[in-house]
Amino acid sequence: MSTHATNRIVGFPVPRKEGVDKLLGAARYVDDIERHGMWHGATVRSTVPRGLIRSIGFDRNIDWGEFTVVTAADIPGENHIQMIAADQPCLADGQVNHCDEPILLLAHPDKQKVRDAVNAVHIEYDLLPPVFTIEESEKQQAVVWGADNHFKSFLLEKGDVDAAWAHAAHIVEGEYRTGAQEHLYIENNGVIAEHDVHNGVTVWGSLQCPFYVHRSLLAVFDLPAEKVRVIQTETGGAFGGKEDYPSILASHAALLAMKCGHPVKIVYDRMEDLAATTKRHPSRVRHRTALDQQGKLLAMDIEMATDGGAYSTLSSTVLSRATLHAPGTLCMP
């Protein structure tokens, strides 16, 4: 074989850079990493789908002087996660809009103590009407987003679809639904953060999009770009589930690190990861298809709605891709 042929990449197997370490068990994931003097963080979350926070109480049987407690009042910059829209708070401040929304953060040198302390924080709410389904959102009896619960729409048109129905031999109609889908990566979400008054914030995390995380940290800490470092550790699966959410987790760990003066690690257990992180969207698709006598596709009229949940996150990106792919080749030039 010629030298030119052996240098080819296309059509030849390329060894994975991290393959050997993973195979031998030497790969270091975020929970394998330790920092000197590191504390452990945990999150106190809402237990209601929607409500106003009336009071936050702390069990007197716990010595809270051992803990670092962070609320929205401790955020030095903007209390929002900067994604497509800046509508999602880093920490709930006065109101919650979904179950398991983060309200306050705790840190302690002992991992078990900080996890136990989460259950010793008691939050009371004035309940607000929740919205659970696409249909409830469309009725607008409770408006949780903008003026009409409608975040984004896309319209894709080609040809005279209306004329096709008149001479179609067959018309097939149906409504189809998908539920929320969990990405179920093997490694749960996890981040380590350090804060230094002179050098800013550094985070190490299991994530997909370091620049998303960087952008949110700039807003939360009101820092220039050169004072925020985001380092992607070995990532044990993601599948889209670690695109937007690590921006929240990194902000939380860094806020705790800033207040306690120690590196802070937050690694979710499986139940918290399942309950609290973003999922692939529930959807409703109404599909009408016209065919001729031989079964050739003549036209399609497709209406697709996705449930974006309480905040916009990356919902418009998902919907745009669904819109572009829905008609297949019928909308190709």
Image: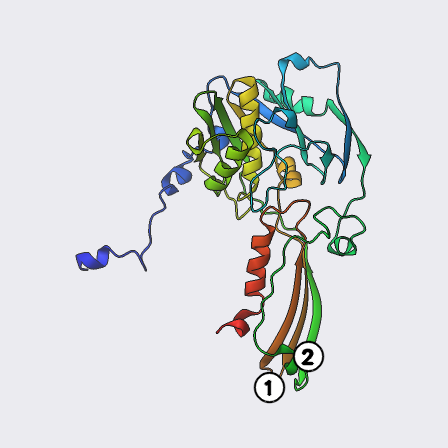
In this rendered view, identify the residue nearer to me: 313 or 239: 313
Residue 188 seen anywhere in this rendered image of the structure: no
Q: Callout 2 environment at 10 Å: few (<14), some (14 to 19), or many (20+)?
A: some
In this rendered view, identify the residue nearer to me: 118 or 224: 224
In this rendered view, identify the residue nearer to me: 127 or 291: 127
Q: Is residue 57 above or below residue 65?
A: below
Question: What residue is at 58 percent from the left and 66 percent from the top?
Answer: 326
Secondary element under disc 2, as helix, strand or loop, is: strand
What's the image's color scheme?
rainbow
The percent coordinates of residue 111 (x first, y second) are 59, 22
Q: Is residue 100 above or below residue 323?
A: above
Residue named by callout 1 = 294
Examine the image and state in which quarter residue 260 appears. top right
Count of numbered circles in the view = 2
Which of marks 1 and 2 precedes in the sequence?
Answer: 2
Question: What residue is at 57 percent from the left and 34 percent from the top?
Answer: 249
Secondary element under disc 1, as helix, strand or loop, is: loop
Residue named by callout 2 = 171
Image quarter hosting the N terminus = bottom left
Q: Amino acid at mark 2?
A: Ile
Q: Callout 1 environment at 10 Å: few (<14), some (14 to 19), or many (20+)?
A: few
The percent coordinates of residue 201 (x first, y second) are 47, 27
Q: Amino acid at mark 1?
A: Gln
Question: What residue is at 47 percent from the left and 24 percent from the top?
Answer: 34
In this rendered view, identify the residue nearer to me: 323 or 44: 323
